[in-house]
Structures are given as C-alpha cells and as structure tokens.
C-alpha cells in the first residue's frame, strides 16, 4: 500500500499519529506528531512491540482489543496511558483499523490528549468536609489579595457503570487527582454522590478535566467529568461571596439537587452571585417601593398606624428576596432604605400625623450599623422617632441577644417603638421576649386565621394576651380577614388588628377610615365560642 493512502488513513481517522504493526504486533511504520518534544515516533518506536509503549493496565485493554478486532473492521476508541518513561505518562486515544489490503498488518491511529504528567501512586487522600471547604475558602479569600480564586464544581459521570469491587480504588484515585489540581494540593471536597468542589488559582478548568480523564484512562474505566468554574474574587465583597457559597450549598443539599443535572451547585452559586449583585444595585438605586397596610384599634376601628411592606419589582412578594438578603447578610442596608422611604412618606404633605411601622430583620440587629444609621436618619427629629416603629421579624436568628438588646434599648430610648413580628411561630420567640425590651407583639397570622375553628389557637392567643397584659405590651392580631375573626380577637382581648378586613397594602397610607369598626358593644360575645 502506497504511503499516500496510509496518510489518507491518518486524515480519515483525524488522528495525530499513525502506526502500522505487523502480524506479530511489531511496529513497522510510525509517522505524525510526537507525544512530547524530542520524542520522535519514527525513531523511537519502529521495531518495538506496540504493547511496549503503554502502562501495564493499558496493555491489558489493548491486547483485548487486538484479539477482538475482526478483519476489515475498526475498533472502538480506547483511551490508554502512553509511557513516556521515568514515571511520566500522556493519555492517548487509540483506534485500530484492519484494512484488507494491509492484512495481516494493522493500522493504529493515535490522538494525543491532555498534557504529559508524572504519575504518583495514589495515596489515601483526605477530602475536606463541606464546612472545612467553607473555612478554607474564607481563609483564602481573606489572604488572597489580588490573586484569583476559583471554585470548580466537578460532577464525575459514569460512576454507575463501575463494578463495585473497583469503586474504592477508583475513588481513591479520583480524590488524589482532584486534590492534586486544587490549591496547595489540599482544597478539594467531596460534596455528595458524584459531586466534588475544589478551589483553584487557574481560571482554566481543563486541567481538572484532564486529571479525571487521566484516572479514567489509567483505570481503564469509562468515567468522565462535567467541570464548571466560578470566579470568587471577581470584584465582589468576599464576605458576601462566602455567604453566597454557603447558601448555594444549602440550597443544593436541601433540595437534594446535587444529583439533579438541572439544579447543579455551580448554577445555584452563579445565580446567587447574580442575585446578590442585582439586590445591591436595587438597594443602591432605591429601586423598590413600599405599600402601606392599616393597623387598627380593634375596638374603635380607628387607624392606629400603618405597616410599610416592601414591594420589589419583578417579584410576586418580598419574602424570597428578603430571605436571600438575610442569608447573604445584605438585609441591613435594605431595611435602612425602607426606613428612609417611610420617613419620606411621613414627611410628605398630608401625612404629618401618620404613624408607620417598618419591618426590620433580626439580622439587621446583629451589628451596630442599622441602629446607628437609623438614629442619623432621624437626628433632631423627635416627632419622626415617635411616629416610626420597628417590627422585628424573626426569620433570621439573632446571633447575639445581649448585643441586640443594647442596640434596641438605644433605639427605644430615642423614641421609636418596637414590636416583635409573627409572634408564636419562630423557635426563639420566647427567648426574644425574655431578652429584648419591646413595646408590643404581633400575633402570627396563622393562629389568628385558625382561631375561629381551632380551640387550641384560641387558648394560645388568650394566654398570650394575658402574658402581654402582665408585661404591659400591646398585642396586634395579624391576618384579620373577616369581621368574624375581628370580633373573636376583640373577645380575646387583643388590642390592634391588621388584615384584609381592614384593608390591603396600598401605595399610600389611606387616610380615611378603612372599614366599619367592629362593635365594642359585642365585646365578650365570642367568649362563649370556646
Ligand atoms: P409581615 O411583616 O408579617 O407582613 C404581613 C404580611 O401579611 C404581608 O405580606 C401582608 O401583605 C400579608 N397580609 C396582610 N394582611 C393579610 C391578610 O388578611 N391575609 C393574608 N393572608 N395575608 C395578609 P407581604 O407584604 O408579602 O410581606 C411578607 C413578609 O415579608 C413580611 O411579613 C415581612 O416578614 C417581610 N417584609 C416585608 N417588607 C419588609 C421589609 O421592608 N424588611 C424586612 N426585613 N422584611 C420585610
Ligand atoms: Mg411585619
Ligand atoms: Mg407579621
């Protein structure tokens, strides 16, 4: 066969190197690219046995493929480890062709993959736990200066086809390979199932893919990797980045999404980082509004004050954005802009007597920033302080109750009133009541809504009202949707009520009376209900 038709074979196989072996497996012709500089196939391979070129485990697979090859056919591609000598290898994809006009000779087309690497025997490698990964990330972010830090997510594919008795060895090898391409060789973590995460300096993820493919070729197992990298040092606040990472881990683990291809960890983190940036931009541009819902004196129906509720463009309700902002420790800046907007509303013409309550996430009381900024905002304005109250929402927990109490005491001393929101649902509501000095509690809407049908809810509310009376605290019933519930609350001794019965949240505080008062005359009438 002429050389040019052999070259055609090379082009046909779109390979880098073409080898021809005789019936005994000896190389009679080698041409094309070398696996590394100074290593000419023609000069170094001719006359040697093809199987001499590869690492021992690859040889077994090559021999099996040579035996299986039928005349006129070509083999499936085989990823093998080419032995460069002195413990160095390079992965190569090999295809065998049995061309009838060459028989008994065979052609082999080789495509070089990845880069040459030194193979160490895989030692049992400790992987970081998720918490250690977060700790390590935190340390590296704090110390990295201008160095880039990337977080690579690796989903190892094809593990399900690995025979159980080979799994342990394969995993040890994989762990070793992943650690070796992570920062300091010790920043890889096994998240769950086939999901891994590792910290890297290099922005190019291909070294991680290569590491996995090298293991696959060495072990002769058909595993692959889906690798995505996220840059953690991309001009973002590092503290918040870390929180985003924790959040993404939690979301994925809680939803069991680490195995779900459409909700992968890197996508969750990517999305979280984007949401974080857009939340910051929204707060900076003050690009959201407040709606106002009346809170009335249950006995007279007169408006006592309005609750300001955030309305965020493009979202159904504020809750998911607020939860995310709490998780990412961005809530205090938001709560402050809410206070600023409410104060603006109180200062606008016609609203000089209006009292407003704003929601403040418990997370905003974890540092001095919110309280100090609130005092600055209302400096020299005792009337505003008297007319603005805070509802502490318990969705984020207070890390330091003593510190929060000191901050709240300063805020109350300045003239603001403070309520505990959604009382009764959170695990720590009594802890809060015990440690924080407040002016009132808002009874969670869930109890209020159930109260007509459910004796237990009524008993709880009655006892809560008694306790608050003893502590000289005002009580507010949330989610009063009907006149029947309003009457029941009057009967149970609750002071104030809020809910659709009195009015939904609206873009401006509604100054005219919202609804006919529930007759105080009927006070006590509902006691007989339970
Ligand atoms: P929340 O402070 O308990 O506010 C009361 C929620 O109940 C509001 O939902 C309100 O629209 C809704 N609501 C009022 N009356 C009724 C009723 O009769 N029936 C029913 N089913 N619902 C009623 P919204 O506006 O979606 O707010 C949800 C939560 O988001 C708030 O609960 C609060 O925890 C949080 N939030 C809202 N604005 C802010 C804010 O500016 N800062 C912070 N940190 N949290 C906020
Ligand atoms: Mg509230
Ligand atoms: Mg509430």
Image: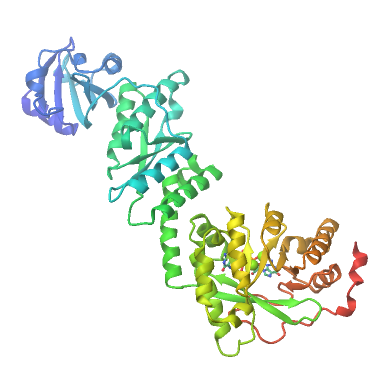
124 is higher (above) or lower (below) than 485? above
Q: Nearer the viewer, residue 314 or 333?
A: 333
> Where's residue 146, x and y in %?
28, 51
Q: Nearer the viewer, residue 476 or 198?
A: 476
31 is higher (above) or lower (below) than 419? above
Looking at the picture, the colour scheme in use is rainbow
19 is higher (above) or lower (below) than 240? above
Residue 24: image quadrant is: top left
Quadrant including the C terminus:
bottom right
> Where's residue 414, x and y in %?
60, 74
State the residue lying farthest toward the bottom: 349
> Where's residue 331, x and y in %?
51, 62
Q: Residue at x 10, y 25 (%)?
A: 31
Residue 415: image quadrant is: bottom right
Relative placement, left or right, of 453 versus 39 is right
Relative placement, left or right, of 493 versus 378 is right
Task: Report whether residue 319 is seen.
Answer: yes
Quadrant including the N terminus:
top left
Q: Nearer the viewer, residue 355 or 406?
A: 406
Task: Report whether residue 271 is seen.
Answer: no
> Where's residue 375, x and y in %?
53, 73
State the residue lying farthest toward the top: 24
Q: Residue at x 31, y 47 (%)?
A: 144
Relative placement, left or right, of 256 versus 61 is right
Q: Residue at x 19, y 27 (%)?
A: 110
Relative placement, left or right, of 344 versus 229 is right
467 is higher (above) or lower (below) than 126? below
Residue 485: image quadrant is: bottom right
């Amino acid at each position: 066969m002429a050389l040019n038709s052999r070259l055609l074979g090379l082009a046909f196989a779109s390979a880098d190197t073409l080898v021809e072996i005789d019936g005994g497996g000896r190389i009679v012709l080698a041409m094309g690219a070398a696996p590394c500089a100074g290593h000419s196939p023609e000069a170094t391979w001719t006359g040697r046995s093809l199987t001499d070129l590869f690492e021992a485990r690859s040889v077994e697979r090559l021999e099996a493929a040579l035996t299986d090859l039928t005349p006129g056919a070509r083999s499936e591609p085989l990823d093998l480890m080419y032995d460069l000598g002195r413990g160095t290898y390079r992965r190569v994809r090999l295809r065998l062709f049995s061309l009838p006009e060459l028989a008994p000779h065979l052609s082999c087309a080789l495509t070089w993959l990845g880069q040459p690497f030194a193979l160490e025997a895989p030692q049992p490698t400790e992987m970081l736990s998720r918490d250690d990964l977060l700790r390590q990330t935190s340390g590296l972010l704090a110390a990295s200066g201008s160095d880039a830090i990337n977080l690579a997510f690796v989903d190892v594919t094809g593990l399900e086809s690995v025979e159980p008795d080979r799994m342990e060895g394969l995993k040890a090898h994989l762990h070793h390979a992943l650690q070796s391409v992570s920062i300091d060789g010790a920043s890889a973590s096994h998240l769950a199932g086939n999901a891994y995460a590792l910290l890297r300096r290099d922005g190019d993820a291909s070294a991680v893919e290569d590491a996995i493919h090298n293991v696959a070729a060495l072990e002769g197992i058909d595993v692959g990797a889906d690798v995505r990298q996220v840059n953690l040092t991309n001009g973002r606040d590092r503290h918040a980045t870390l929180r985003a990472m924790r959040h993404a881990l939690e979301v994925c683990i809680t939803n069991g999404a680490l195995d779900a291809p459409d909700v992968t960890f890197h996508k969750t983190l990517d999305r979280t980082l984007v949401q974080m940036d857009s939340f910051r931009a929204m707060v900076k541009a003050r690009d959201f509004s407040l709606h106002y819902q009346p809170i009335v004196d249950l006995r007279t129906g007169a408006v006592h004050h309005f609750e300001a509720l955030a309305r965020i463009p493009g979202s159904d309700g504020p809750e998911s954005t607020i939860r995310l902002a709490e998780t990412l420790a961005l809530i205090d800046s938001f709560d402050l802009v809410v206070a600023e907007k409410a104060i603006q509303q109180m200062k606008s013409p016609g609203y000089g007597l209006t009292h407003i309550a704003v929601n403040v996430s418990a997370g905003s009381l974890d540092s001095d920033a919110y309280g100090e900024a609130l005092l600055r905002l209302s400096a020299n304005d005792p009337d505003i302080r008297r007319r603005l109250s805070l509802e502490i929402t318990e969705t984020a927990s207070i890390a330091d109750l003593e510190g929060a109490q000191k901050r709240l005491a300063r805020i109350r001393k300045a003239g603001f009133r403070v309520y505990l929101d959604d009382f009764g649902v959170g695990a720590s509501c009594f802890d809060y009541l015990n440690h924080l000095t407040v002016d009132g509690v808002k009874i969670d809407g869930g109890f209020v809504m159930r109260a007509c049908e459910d004796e237990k809810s009524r008993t709880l509310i009655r006892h809560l009202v008694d306790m608050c009376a003893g502590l000289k605290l005002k009580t507010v019933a949330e989610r009063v949707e009907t006149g029947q519930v309003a009457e029941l609350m009057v009967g149970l001794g609750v002071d104030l009520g809020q809910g659709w019965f009195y009015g939904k949240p609206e873009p401006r505080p509604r100054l005219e009376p919202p609804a006919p008062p529930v007759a105080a005359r009927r006070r006590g009438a509902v006691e007989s209900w339970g």
